[in-house]
Amino acid sequence: MAKNVLKKIVLSVMLVGITFGSLANCFGKFALVRVFYNANDGINVGGGLLAKIVKTILFYIPFGFLMAIGGFIDFLLFNLIEFWSGSNPVGLNEYDQEGKFAKSFEKEGEKLTLIYSNFGARLDLTAVSKEGKSETLTAFRAQPGKFFVEKEGKLSEVAVTSQTVGSQVILKLTEQGKLKSSKVVEAKTLEDLELKAAGTL
């Protein structure tokens, strides 16, 4: 009788060990959990302490439950699909196999496209105005705070400065000390754009 109980315990431990061992390299992007996390993070209620309290309550009550279920589904289904096929059906906005990721924002006829390459080592930021004029800035993770423009196949450094005047921000792009372009945007619009861009990283 004791041998049967011991055999069952050893068999159970071996089964659990083999199952977790076979799934050990199957951890993927947990894209479904990120969807719930980003949904909670995108909630804007008031400001300051009130916003933090509301986000915290929503994070623990409905979103915590949803993230637990999402994590379970991610672990058992979507991450296994990603492991065997190389792509996650939920993580459509992730880097492809060549290390590229693109995200676009559009508002009032103006478009901003962020193209990450080499798994985020390089960022090409292209802004297209209502008139169709486009301008591309390049940034590198290894050189934080520096921006470049490409001319004749070569990158040259440019300076981007901002000045807040009331509820508006003046963005200036200078190259070799000369003003190349400027743009006036609402501070709230710029803040929203920065939050959206941070969410894509």
Image (cartoon, rainbow, N blue to C red):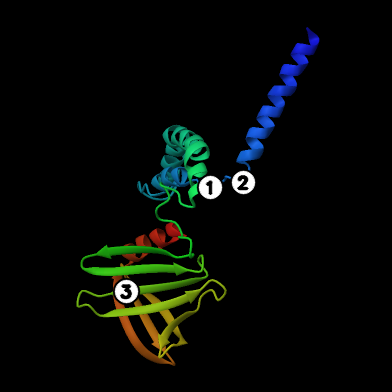
In space, the residues marked 2 and 3 are separated at their CA atoms by: 40 Å
Determine contact: label 2, label 1, CB under 8 Å.
Answer: yes
Q: Is residue 85 or residue 39 the one in the foreground?
A: 85
- Lower sequence index among marks 2 and 3: 2
Residue on which the image places disc 1: 83
Q: Is residue 158 or residue 76 the one in the foreground?
A: 76
Determine contact: label 3, label 1, CB under 8 Å.
Answer: no
On the rendered structure, is 64 left or right of 27? left
Q: Quadrant of the N terminus?
A: top right
Q: Report the residue at 75% width, 17% height from top.
A: 7
- In the image, residue 103 lies at what x, y percent? 37, 62
Looking at the image, is 65 positioned above or below residue 184?
A: above
Q: Is residue 68 or residue 175 the one in the foreground?
A: 68
Q: Is residue 81 or residue 133 the one in the foreground?
A: 81
- Lower sequence index among marks 3 and 1: 1
Dot 2: what SS? loop
Amino acid type, mark 1: Phe
**Mark 2 or 3, closer to the camera:** 2
Residue on which the image places disc 2: 25
Dot 1: what SS? helix
Amino acid type, mark 2: Asn
- Say the numbered circle drawn on residue 127: 3
Q: Report the residue at 55% width, 76% height from top.
A: 143
On the rendered structure, is 77 left or right of 92? right
Amino acid type, mark 3: Ala
